[in-house]
Image (cartoon, rainbow, N blue to C red):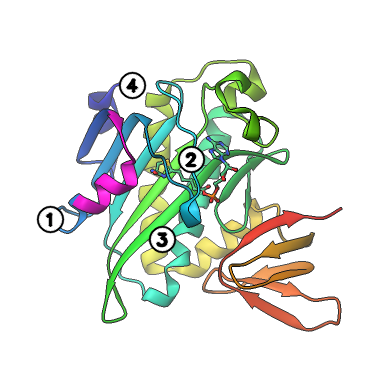
Amino acid sequence: MNIEKIKQGVRGNIGQEIFFYPVIDSTNTVAFEKALNSREGLVIIAESQLKGKGRLGRKWVSPPGLNIYMSIVLKPLIELTDATLITIMAAVACSIALRKISGLEITIKWPNDLIFQNRKIGGILTELKSENKKIVFAVLGIGININADSKDFPEDIRNIATSLKNETKKNFSRTKIIIELLNELNKWYSILNSDPKTVINKWKELASTIGKKVRVETVQENFEGIAQDIDEKGALILKLPAGKQKRIISGDLKELS
Ligand code: BT5
């Protein structure tokens, strides 16, 4: 990975400053510690993570030297109640960048998964610091499987995870992909701050979720129904069997056939 080349290739605030670590607990944790005293757009990149994080205390498998583990400090102007849009925006930017680089039709599964043919190729974890119902900063964490083979994944996720290499039988330059990712993030983040509806519309174009019969598990309850739409705040609108609509802010979604 060539950090100087990344800095030279990036246009915009995000990626002007990059901290690189060969090994780290979690890029999100480090970004969170640095965020208050750093400018918007600081990027933390690691070659491997010892305690890579998923949502709700889950783990992100982070083998060394193969994939992308990256976190970005953002200080968005949006309301706290719109924070899900940060994840929605990042999914749009990642899906576009990965499609450009690989030619694979990488889709988005609500709320935070990057998917190729039902397997997870990447995930997004947005963590927030808020005060008085305002966002002080957000840490946008992105993990994408690039050159990992299936043997690099532990057995428990081997059947649900994939990588660009796994799907194309080619190795990819992570430097080039990060440049593409950061440039798309610069573009879509500025659209988010000025015209969030455009981000939502693009998400709907790139997502595989809408129209599917799904099961959604939330911390409190589980629901089954048709994923009808996402609203202007990024929440999922589920049509329940009885015909009623249910609005879900966050959860785990499985497609039912
Ligand atoms: C996510 O959580 O998908 C968010 C992943 C965010 C990872 C990035 S890496 C850089 C930054 N620093 C961090 O510490 N984290 C972020 P969730 O939706 O909860 O999915 C977690 C689940 O995905 C796990 O329980 C596994 O089933 C599966 N999983 C774990 N590692 C994976 C991998 N490398 N590839 C595909 N699936 C994985």
Would you say 207 lies left or right of 51 here?
right
Decide: marks 3, 2 in contact (CB < 8 A)?
Answer: no
The residue carrying mark 1 is: 37
Upstream in the sequence, badge 2 or badge 1?
1
Q: CA distance from mark 3 to mark 4?
A: 29 Å
The CB of the residue at mark 2 lies under 8 Å from ligand 1: yes
Upstream in the sequence, badge 3 or badge 2?
2
Would you say 213 lies left or right of 79 here?
right
Upstream in the sequence, badge 4 or badge 1?
4
- The stretch in magenta equals 23-33
- Which of 86 and 183 lies nearest the eye of the viewer? 86
Residue at point 68% right, 58% down?
Answer: 253
The residue carrying mark 4 is: 1
Q: CA distance from mark 4 to mark 1?
A: 26 Å
Residue 125 screen position, x and y as percent: 44, 52
Residue 13 visible in the displayed image? no
The residue carrying mark 2 is: 60
Residue at point 34% right, 41% down?
Answer: 26
